[in-house]
Each structure stands twice: as C-alpha cells, then as structure tokens.
Image (cartoon, rainbow, N blue to C red):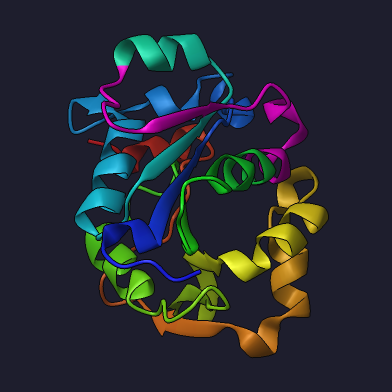
Amino acid sequence: MTNTGTNQVAGLLLAAGGGRRLGGRAKALLTHQGRPLVEHAVRMLREGGCGPVHVVLGAAADDVRARARLDGCVLVDNPAWEEGMGSSLRAGLDSLKDAGSSAALVLLVDQPGIGAAAVARVRAAYHSPASLAAAAYDGERGHPVLFGRDHWAGIAASAHGDRGARAYLKEHAADIRLIECGDAAEAYDIDTPADLRHLE
C-alpha cells in the first residue's frame, strides 16, 4: 500500500519516559525554549514533513495532556511504559496500523538536538513500505529511524525492554540505508541532570 502526500510517512514520537536518572521528571515535560519538550519534538516531525503525528505517552501522561499543546496529534497511552522503550514502540506502531501510512519515522522526545533538517533527510529515504533507513552520525546509526510498514510486525515482535528496535535493526543491518546527519543535528540524549544544560 503506497499513499501520496504527507500521510505516506507518519511521525511517531516516543515520549513516555519517566526520567529515572532525572529524579523522576517526565521527559516530555522538561522545558525547552519556554515550552514542554514534547511540543518541540512534534514541531520537528511536522516541519520535517511527517504526518500524521502519533505521540506515545506514559509517565505523567495526564499532566502532558493538560500542559502541552498537542492539537492534531494522536495521543497513545502506554500503560506499560516502565518496561522500557520497547513497549512504547510496540504501542506506537500498533496505533498506526489503521492510519493509512506506509512508513513511520520514529523520533525520541529526549533528543532535542535532532531538528527538522535531519527528520526531512531521513523521511526523504522513503521509497516503499519496504523502506528501512536511519540517521547516521559520523557513520554510526542513530535517530530518527524510518520503518516501512513491511517491517512493523517484525519490529514489534522483537521490541522488548529498553532496546527498542535494536535487535531488529542489527538483524537487518544490510537493508538499512544510513543517512548522514552529523552536519545537521546533534544526537545527544537528555538522561542525567548534567544533560539539562542542552535545554534552553
């Protein structure tokens, strides 16, 4: 199934993390540029050409709904968010099954250094539901990652704990198109109090 227009590649934002190493501060609600971090990530997906945008929520989901402006997004609750990123990825892909999209571009809420330029580059690697692509930083695979619909079932079956799609991507390494984004983005994570210096 191949669609035309922005509906071809959906944006899938994983924003369920509870920030264990940040004293239990939900990552989606960290402040960046005066607004919750989740808003920034949604904007990067949209400006990079993705749509619709599905956002997986977990930690402080009710607060995120109340405080963040996520109009037009499909909000997906992951009650098993404490199990790790794998459960959020499964929930997000499941929510996309009926969205009519041929691919999902996955972005993590705690990587604000990845902007619309990197999203657009990886999105442009889409060619069919069999597409598999990822941003690379000095040749090393990172985010965002694009999963054609043909891969969703296999990814969901292998996504456990905090590993997300890592096992699936390792198994299909020869099929991944790496898109160098080191000149357009910084792939740091907001994991510890020291990392908060990256936020404005």
Q: Is residue 10 left or right of residue 51?
A: right
Look at the picture and state if 65 lies above or below 46. Answer: above
* 113 w.r.t. 74: above or below: below
Residue 36 at x, y = what percent? 30, 26
The residue shown at (56%, 30%) is: 16
Image location (x, y in percent) of residue 55:
45, 36
> Which of the pair 41/157 is nearer the observer?
157
Depth check, front residue: 51 or 135 = 51
Where is residue 123 drawn, in percent x and y?
36, 70
- Check if residue 106 falls in the magenta segment: no
- Tell whether 157 sits left or right of 121: right
Horizontal side of residue 76 vs 175, given as left or right: left
Which residues are drawn in magenta?
68-88
Residue at the image point whose x is 53% and y is 78% from the top: 131
At horizontal 63% and vertical 87% (from top left) the residue drawn is: 175
Q: Nearest the camera: 165 or 9?
A: 9
